Amino acid sequence: MAVTWAACDGCGSLVYGKRFARELGVCPECGHHSRLSAPERLAQLLDPGSAQRLAVAPTLVDPLEFVDDRPYLKRLGQARERTGLQDAVVCARGRILGVEVVVGAMDFRFLGGSMGVAVGEAIAGAADTAARDRVPLILVTSSGGARMQEGIWSLLQMAKTSQALAELDALGVPTISVITDPTYAGVAASFATLTDVIISEPGARMGFTGPRVIMETIGETLPEGFQTAETLLRCGLIDAIRPRGELRATLAGLLNRGRPARNAGSGGALIRRVEELPARDAWQVVRQARDSGRPTALDYIAQLVDGFCELHGDRAAGDCTAIVGGIGRVEGRPTMIIANQKGHTTSELIARNHGMATPDGYRKAARLMRLAEKWGLPVITLIDTPGAHPGVAAEEHGQAIAIAESVRLMSQLRTPTVAVVTGEGGSGGALALAVADRVLCLAGAVYSVISPEGCAAILWRDRAHAPRAAAALRVDARELLGMGIVDGVIPEPAGGAHNDPLLAAELLRHGLRAAFAEVTGVPIDELLAARRRRYREIGRENHVRA
């Protein structure tokens, strides 16, 4: 029997054919992801035997009677004969690791994966099926854009498919794009980028205008990695990059609603009476809250959240590293977690901007909150920040607006929310993640309108008065509980969370369980009314804790 070999399109290496198939078309030498046909893609993504292809309604075939160097009808017929497909997308109903889905997979072999009326109708029809059956829609893209031979009819498929995605938004049906190389023009500027979550294969290119056209138009050499998945992730335009072999697990993990949360006891998990907290020196609490050894958000997530999938970017300008967010299961319940991330070492703190978010970070958080609302996920926020990032770029990009919009969004978010101040709760930068149904803090945390040093510099004109300012601002957990600012305090290990991070995480778990026990199952309109009443009454003489 003859041995078959495959040549990698990326590095040119010869790979044993059977191994190449086992690697799902990924070169074991350089990691290049070869293009797959639509049938191959469906076979790799869907559980064996689960695929049921969807029919496509009849469409116009050659609306312009177009001819270039050959009639379009002839070109279309040749593509059909060469690929065995009717057009550049195949849609099917099936399962991914048991999760029911509708998948539309594009095929670049068919006229460069271009979108004409048949492709637009197929995508819209797949969305209709997802809407009717209330199952997630996954779109795997590979396209050069709109099909020129169908002219304006092709262009208007952008509107048809965008509208189809909007209808799924209104119904709360989850949508995910898987970007493969290449995805350009009318496809990139419509359904490919309108989904809730955008995942890309490594090295995949996506953009509106192709590199050659850009270079010919502006006459500049483009930077290395231009329009690649890695650049798109850094620019905040996609959520994640996943190798082909991880796609099934990633998609199923995101979409699997899991089992109900365990009905475990939570008695004593929260301190609700001031008398149960010892009086402490406020400045010492501030110093403890800032201790670099305290668990970070990612430390807590690693202990409390199963299958956490971090989602990146604000889909507009950037991906602030001081804000992390994503979906995972907390005690079996699919949950959106959004948090300030600091670090333990100097290099980590610098990389995370000391937990001080930019406008990109708050807009990323807002995007994830809206996603949680659409998917029906509760939201946990973990707050540990000196404040919003101060700087020229942050101001030019609308820091105040981003914070204001986050506060407004949280006040009306139609899903249960629990916020926990785990370290520093600094000013508006902290409040942007802290407007919730239940607001908690760790016993060693602080929450204030301004840092004690800042207050001392302004009012005492000397930062050396920071300890005095800390006491005057009443920033510690005991004072916050007494003023009704927080609903409960989560105890910490002796000496602080940094002395026993694992125990600190377990205490946080119990506190979250207790808080969610109070808000889970409450009709959303009642929850919203109570949330609005809570903040409406803040500062009134009769203000009491919710």
Image (spheres, rainbow, N blue to C red):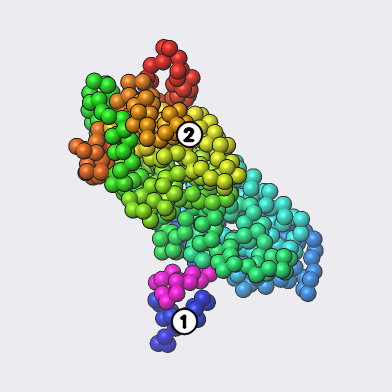
Q: Amino acid at mark 2?
A: Gly
Q: Position of residue 148 (x, y in %)?
A: 74, 63
Q: Which residue is mark 1?
A: 13
Q: Nearer the viewer, mark 2 or mark 1?
A: 2
Report helix, strand or loop for mark 1: loop
Q: Quadrant of the N terminus?
A: bottom left
Q: Amino acid at mark 1?
A: Ser
Is residue 148 at all visible to an observer of this figure?
yes
Chain part drawn in magenta = 21-38
Q: Nearer the viewer, residue 416 or 355?
A: 355
At horizontal 49% and vertical 49% (from top left) the residue drawn is: 320
Q: Position of residue 9 (x, y in %)?
A: 52, 77
At horizontal 80% and vertical 69% (from top left) the residue drawn is: 67
51 left or right, relative to 81: left
Q: Position of residue 36 (x, y in %)?
A: 52, 68
Q: Is residue 157 on the magenta stretch?
A: no
At horizontal 42% and vertical 45% (from top left) the residue drawn is: 355
Q: Which residue is mark 2?
A: 428
294 left or right, relative to 126: left
At horizontal 73% and vertical 66% (from top left) the residue drawn is: 217
Q: Main secondary structure of the magenta part?
A: loop
Q: Is residue 23 on the magenta stretch?
A: yes
